[in-house]
Amino acid sequence: MEGNAMNTVDLFRKLAGFNAWANGKIYDSCAALPQDALRENRGAFFGSIHATLNHLLVVDRGWISRIEGVASGVKSLDQILYEDMAELRRAREAEDARLIRLCDGLDQEGIDRIVSYKFMDGTPAKTALDVILITLFNHQTHHRGQVHAMLTQAGRPGLDLDILVYEFEREAA
């Protein structure tokens, strides 16, 4: 990879693509496990692989909806949006595509804007969009790490989810 300066807009676009790629790798690994292994309580914050993946979708849907100024339908951070893993994966892919579209449509002025929203309890808040996006991507990485550990506990081989691997794969394609 050649070194070149990256602006904030390009960085968020890259992170959105990487996020979708890493989620795909996680879901590919999950596909090899039976449902009971995906729902087994493994001691993570949300318990199981399935519940943690639902949590990631809940949070992304909530934040992206706030950015877009639309209702998310999210009621709680531990809400199970999809009982079926195939449905959960389709929804994850759709949410990742939504985030990519959002980031692709950004310019620096958009990234610098303040987003007004309400927390689930109705408390109003305002946050800069760049901070929301950093929060969203960091949150994804945090819980994907938990899912990766749970997959390893379930006997799945380790995954290399580094952004460098994502870049190498993109360059090779």
Image (tube, grey):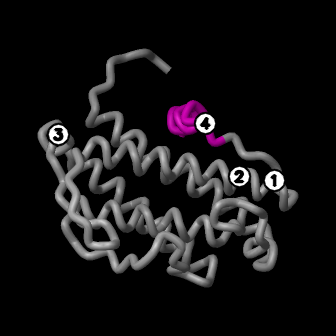
Residue 162 among those drawn in magenta: yes
Outermost residue, right side: 155
Residue in view at x 74 percent, y 72 percent:
38
In the image, residue 145 lies at what x, y percent? Answer: 65, 48
The stretch in magenta equals: 161-173
Could you tell which of marks 4 and 1 lies nearer the N-terminus? 1
Which of 167 and 154 lies nearest the eye of the viewer?
A: 154
Residue in view at x 34 percent, y 42 percent:
13
Distance between the alpha carbons at the discs numbered 3 and 1:
39 Å
Q: Are marks 2 and 1 in contact (CB under 8 Å)?
A: yes
Query: Mark on residue 152?
Result: 1
Distance between the alpha carbons at the discs numbered 2 and 3:
33 Å
Q: Are marks 4 and 1 in contact (CB under 8 Å)?
A: no
Could you tell which of marks 2 and 3 lies nearer the N-terminus? 3
Which dot, 4 or 3, sits closer to the camera? 3
Q: Which residue is mark 2?
A: 148
Could you tell which of marks 3 and 1 lies nearer the N-terminus? 3
Q: What is the tally of numbered marks visible in this picture? A: 4
Q: Amino acid at mark 2?
A: His
Q: Amino acid at mark 1?
A: Thr
For residue 69, what is the image quadrant?
bottom left
Q: Are marks 2 and 4 in contact (CB under 8 Å)?
A: no
Q: Which residue is mark 4?
A: 162
